[in-house]
Image (tube, rainbow, N blue to C red):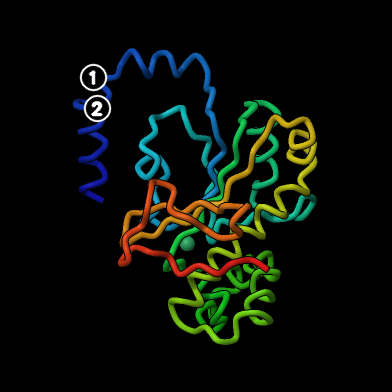
Amino acid sequence: MKSIVQGVRRFRTEVFAEQREYFKKLAAGQHPQALFITCSDSRVVPNIITQTAPGELFVLRNAGNIVPPPGMASGGEAATIEFAVQHLNVEHIIVCGHTQCGAMQALVNPAIADGMPTVRDWLKYAESTRRILQDNYQDYTGDALVNIAAQEHVLMQLEILQTHPVVASRLVQGKLTLHGWIFKIEAGEVFAYDEADGRFQPLAGESTEETKLETVAKV
Ligand SMILES: [Zn+2]
């Protein structure tokens, strides 16, 4: 905790002191360009991996970057999406999963959620992902399966997003674009879903052999 409080002090004296005018402008209103939906995982930090400043991303985080269907009881996800699209007029929604995701690990190995009834309940919203894995990826195990889970899960959340009324409407108007991303932690690399190609591709140029994401083409 000490390092967190020291960080607040450092932010105040070093960072904020240099950006006082920028924050003053931000106080007048926010105009983020995107809604960024990602996992609560401490290793995935939206503003760092996208090198964006305060005010640029409207962020929704939960365990497993899950988008519950509209109308389902939830922790406020639908309200956050509605606010971002309807009120803030974001033009992009990015759903960003990641490698080594604890929620995906619990999805492929439910015993991990033993003793955590709330986590188990929450993961029911990812049942479609679990079913896709069970029926289509029997040959995969371990990290490879978890990372494939992250990819299939992102694609499924994009499908569910489109059933949220305000998202559906803006898509029809051509005023909103959806993006599916995977952040590979150890490579510091972002992969974006390429619809034409049917797979996740490195967003920032060619991936080296070591950083390549095991990716499965959609049929
Ligand atoms: Zn995660």
Identify the residue at image location x=50%, y=67%.
215
Q: Which mark is residue 15?
A: 2
- Asked if the residue under mark 1 is in contact with the one under mark 2, i.e. CB atoms within 8 Å, the reply is yes
Identify the residue at image location x=56%, y=56%.
65
- Label 2: which secondary element: helix
Q: Residues within 10 Å of mark 2 (few under 14, many from 20)?
A: few
Q: Residues within 10 Å of mark 1 (few under 14, many from 20)?
A: few
Identify the residue at image location x=67%, y=74%.
132
Q: Is residue 52 left or right of residue 128?
A: left
- Closer to the camera, 149 or 45? 149
- Label 1: which secondary element: helix
Which amino acid type is marked by label 2?
Answer: Val
Residue 128, above or below 88:
below
- Closer to the camera, 208 or 49? 208
* Residue 133 in picture, x, y percent from top left: 62, 77
Identify the residue at image location x=60%, y=80%.
137
The quadrant holding residue 122 is: bottom right
* Residue 141 in picture, x, y percent from top left: 49, 84
Q: Is residue 137 left or right of residue 22?
A: right
- Closer to the camera, 124 or 162? 162
For the residues marked 2 and 1, what is the alpha-carbon distance in whole angstroms? 5 Å
Say which residue label 1 marks. Answer: 18
